[in-house]
Image (tube, rainbow, N blue to C red):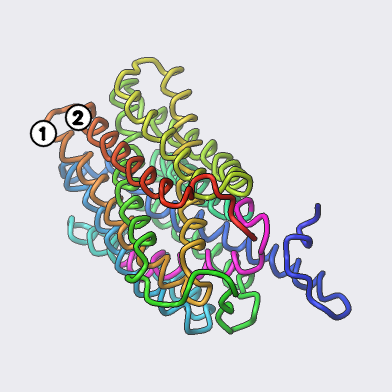
Amino acid sequence: MTIATTLDRPSGPNALDRVAGGGVRAALGATIGMATGFGSLALISVFISPLQGEFGWSKSELSTCYTLAAVGMAVGGMVWGRVSDRIDIRYLLASGGLFLVLPLFVMSMATALWHFYAAHLVLGIAGFGCLYAPLVSASGEWFDSRRGLVMGIVTAGGALGQGIMPFAAESLIAGLGWREAFVALGLAVLALQSVIWMLVRRRHGNAVAPARTGGPASGGVFSRPRLLALALAAFLCCACMGVPLIHLAGFVSSVCGSTSFGATSLLVAMVFGAVGRVCFGMVADRWGNLFAYACASAMQTACILVFPMLQSELSILAMSALFGFGFAGNMTCLILCVRDEAPASGFGAAIGLVMFIAWAGMGLGGYLGGAMFDLTGAYSLAFLASGLFGVANLAVLALLGLNLGAMRRPRMA
């Protein structure tokens, strides 16, 4: 099956080829955008040690950088998601790309903790928060069947970015120093943002995607109980993953005594996460979006509860791979579940609301990981709390699944 068969079949000579090409370009651009956005948010995980060494700040203080970025994503995603339903997304792509790059340059010159806090807040609100909804909305519009697979590929970029950018940053820090590392990363992100701006376009030009007949009734997102339940599940899911995403490298370094091995374990998790997002997208196409979301969440939770029991490098690498495969599928499936519950013309607002609540959970998890380490001197309690958030998330998904048998109802194209 070629990618063209996944699209509505337009009339006119060469129309199908034009639509297929536009879909491929949009998906490629969105994949790169996810990589640079999520990768930039995760960079603080490998800058904690050098910043502690130079300034003496605690892990909880530095973990707050990620919390503020997540809060910024929450606020920015809700605002810009609604805006993306109404204007030409090229403006959002340009603005979001600019404010994804500028905070990295600001951090290279920072001398006080509040400088890092402000830069991460701007990176979340005006940077990736501005890019997220346009990227997933525009790329998803081109595909009406096999959407799970396509969204898996697009969101796999986020997992790769979360692994590759911190891994590259760790090498740059070792070779150049942490300030120069921020500059180099900023220049790389700037180049990639220009590529994204050229590739990503809506399927229907500047117009908003038309609402589907037979889809969910129109109305505000707050009038949709299932959508709000998904938002609660997303909060719990992201609070669960927030601890290992920010502190996995630190946990591994504390066990194995090597900062480079900590960065390597994070890279392994994210590489397998890229594969997991594609695989869970295919599971969603076959057995339903909510069912796939529950499976990904169950794997994530189980891995997090096992992590503190591991002491050898090999076992940690193996568990990092399993964790990455499971956790990464959550983002793919959550987007697909939101698409099930919201009309196409209001998807930006819907995903903005859900991600507002989800990123609040991510920020909470990231902060708690650092605070609990400062309190106890170990990561065991933080990973236990993370696992409990995951169990609560599974309970919410089970209740959603029991409602009209949604977990076993395949998604209709």
Residue type pointed to by label 1: Leu
Q: Which residue is tagged 2?
A: 381
- Closest to the observer, 61 or 11: 11
Instruction: Give residue 78's quadrant in the image.
Output: bottom left
Is 142 within the magenta? yes
In the picture provided, is 226 more to the left or to the right than 285? left
In the picture provided, is 56 more to the left or to the right than 182? left
Instruction: Give residue 101's quadrant in the image.
Output: bottom left
The residue that appears at 45% across and 55% down in the rendered structure is 185
Q: Alpha-carbon neighbours of circle 1 within 10 Å: few (<14), some, or many (≥20)?
A: few
Where residue 299 appears, x then y in whole percent? 44, 33
Q: Label 1 near label 2: C-beta < 8 Å?
A: yes
**Highlighted range, magenta:** 122-149
Secondary structure of the residue carrying tag 1 is helix
Q: Which residue is tagged 1?
A: 375
Is 217 within the magenta? no
In the picture provided, is 43 more to the left or to the right than 50? right
Where residue 129 appears, x then y in whole percent? 38, 66
The residue that appears at 58% across and 40% down in the rendered structure is 275
Where residue 164 appears, x then y in whole percent? 50, 44
